[in-house]
Amino acid sequence: MERLCFAGGSSGFSWVASTSRTIIGALILLGSCTLAVPAALAKPSPYLNGDRNLIDVYAAVEGAKLGVLLPGGPEKFITLKESSASVLKTPTGAAGGETECVDSSGGDEGPAAGCTIELAVLPHKNGELRDTIIHETFHVFQAVMSQTLANFHSGLDKDWLIEGSATWVESDLVKHDALAQEEWRVYLSTPGIPLFSRTGTKSSPGALNGYSAVGFFGHMASSNKSPWARFPQMFKAKGSAAAYAAAGVDTPFLDNEASVFFRDPKLGPEWDQAGPNVPSAHEVGFRPNQLSLGSRRIAPLVVKPYADGAYDLTITGLPMSHPVLELKVLRGNVRIRSTSGGSVNEVDPQDLRLCANLTICSCPGQPNRYLKFQRGDLAITGGPTGAEVRLVAREPCEQLLRPVSCTAVLPDFVQFIQGVAGKPAAIESHRADGTVASACAFLEKGTETPVGEGQTVFNGLVAPVVSVLRSSSIAGAVKYFELMSVPVAHFHLTRLRIGDEAVLRTEAMASTTGIEEFSSSAIVRVNNIVASYAIYGTPGNNEADLENSIARLIQVAGRL
C-alpha cells in the first residue's frame, strides 16, 4: 500500500492497489513498463475519452455532495494524462493513479490553480478504473478545500485525513470496492493504532498507512455526522487536531467508537460497525485483548489519544480475599457489558463495583452494592485526551471511617464570625443511611497590624468555607469527589495522589498595588471521607501558593 507522495515542486498523491494488486502491478512493471516508447511511434491512448467523461461525471457528483465548485469547472481545472505504463512509479511505490496540483505560479504553496490526474494502464484492465478515478478526483477537491497547497500537504500526520477520506469517498460511491473492504479489515483489526499515526511513513516504522483511517469516516457516517458535509471545514483546518475537531466528534460518537470493534449486530449500532464495504466480523477476524484478572495487583488500562482499546474482561479469578473489582474511569469514554454471569450494561460509568459471586461479596449488616459480572466486553475510547481506567481488587466488606468535623481540617485557623442572621457558622447534619456532613464558614489565620488610631490591617489567610462529607460507602464518596472536582475559570487544576485521590486548584495574581496574591482550593478523598476547602492569602503572603498548598493538603489528608 502506498500513501500520499510529493514530487518535485508540486503536490502529488497516488492511489495504489491492495497487497495482491500491488504485487501484480509490480510484476507487470518489471516485465514491461520499463520499455520506453519512442515519441514518434506513440499512439493516442484508447482510454482518453472514456476516462475524461468519468472524471467529469464524478467531479460533478463529488462537488454536489461537498457543495464545492472547482474554479472554471472540472474540464478546465483537471487535466487528464494517460500513461503508457501498466503502473506508475512514485516515490512511495507502484500506483494505478496519481494526482498533482500546482498554484498559479506552478508551485505548491498558494491556492490550487489546476490539477493533473495521471492514470496507468492497469486500472483499465483489472476492473478498478472507476474506483481509481473517484479516489484521484477527490484528491483534487481536497486541494481546493485546503485553501492553499501549503496547508494541504503540511504535516505527515495528515495522511489519515487525505488518504482515509479519499478511501471512504470511494467506498461510499462504489458498491463493491475490494480495496476499501481491505482497508476496512485493517481498521477493524487495529483499534490500538492512533488515528494520526496511520501514516505508513519511513519516519514511523510499523505504523499503518492513511488508507486504513477509512474507519474513522465510516464511523462518522454511522453516527449521523455526514463526512461530505464536514469535509470542507476539516480540510480548511490547520493540522490534524483542528481537522479532528472540525469532524464534530462528540460524546455519543466517542461512546461508540471503541465498542463497534466487538461486531455484535444483535446489540445494535453501539456494538457493531455497519456501512458500505464493511466486511463481516468473520472476514475481519479481530479478537479483543484477553484480560483475565487473578491477582490483587492490576495495572491500569491506558489507551493513547485518538486510539481505542477493546478487552475481553474476566474477573472470576480474583482472590477470595479481594473478590470485588472496582473499575474507575479517570479519563476517556467507556462501555462495559456482561457476556456471561451478569447483566451489566453501562456507558461512561465513573465508578463500578463488580463481583463474580454476590454470595462471597455479601456483608452482614451492610446492603449489597455490587453488580454481578463474571465476563464481558470492555470498550475504551481514547479520544483527544487519551483514556485511563483504574482496576482495583477490593475486600468485599468496606471498612468505613468515622465522621470528621470541619474544625479538624484546618486546626490552625479560627472562626472570626460565629453566626449570621441568628444561624451558626458551623453546622453538622446526619442522614439515616450514615452520611454525615459538616461545614464551617469564616475561618482565618493571621495577625492584625495597627495602621492608625483604632484601625488595623489583617495579614494572613482566610478560608471562607470548609466542608467534610462522611459517605455511607466508598462508592458514594467517589461520586461526590468527582462532582466536586470540576475545573474553575482562571484556576490551574492539578490531580494529585494524596490520600486516595485529590484535586488542587491554584491561582496567582497581582493585587491593585502590584503585590502578588495567591489563592487555592482543594478536594481530597480518604476512603469514604471527602474534605474540601478554599484559602485566600493577603497580598505578599505565599502560604496559598502551589508548594505550600500541596504541603497543607498532605496534612489535611492525614487528619481524615
Image: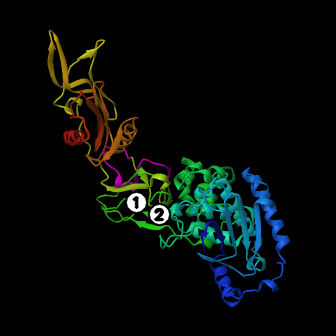
Nearer the observer, disc 1 or disc 2?
1
The reply to whether dot 1 and dot 2 touch (C-beta < 8 Å) is: yes
Residue 347 in view in this figure: yes
Please name the residue that numbered disc 2 is placed on: 311
Range drawn in magenta = 345-368
Residue 214 in view in this figure: no
Residue displayed at 81% across by 70% down: 51
Residue displayed at 66% across by 88% down: 30
Q: Is residue 122 left or right of residue 295?
A: right
Residue 205 locus on image (x, y percent): 47, 73
The answer for how far apart the CA atoms under marks 1 and 2 are is 10 Å
Q: What element carries label 2?
A: strand
The earlier-in-sequence mark between 1 and 2 is 1
Q: Is residue 443 left or right of residue 311?
A: left
The image quarter in which residue 394 lies: bottom left
Q: Does the magenta stretch include residue 351?
A: yes
Which residue type carries mark 2? Answer: Tyr
Q: Is 448 above or below relative to 102? A: above
Graded by Cα atoms within 10 Å as few (under 14), some (14 to 19) or many (20 or more), the crowding at tag 1 reads some
Q: Is 219 above or below relative to 281? A: above
Please name the residue that numbered disc 1 is placed on: 301
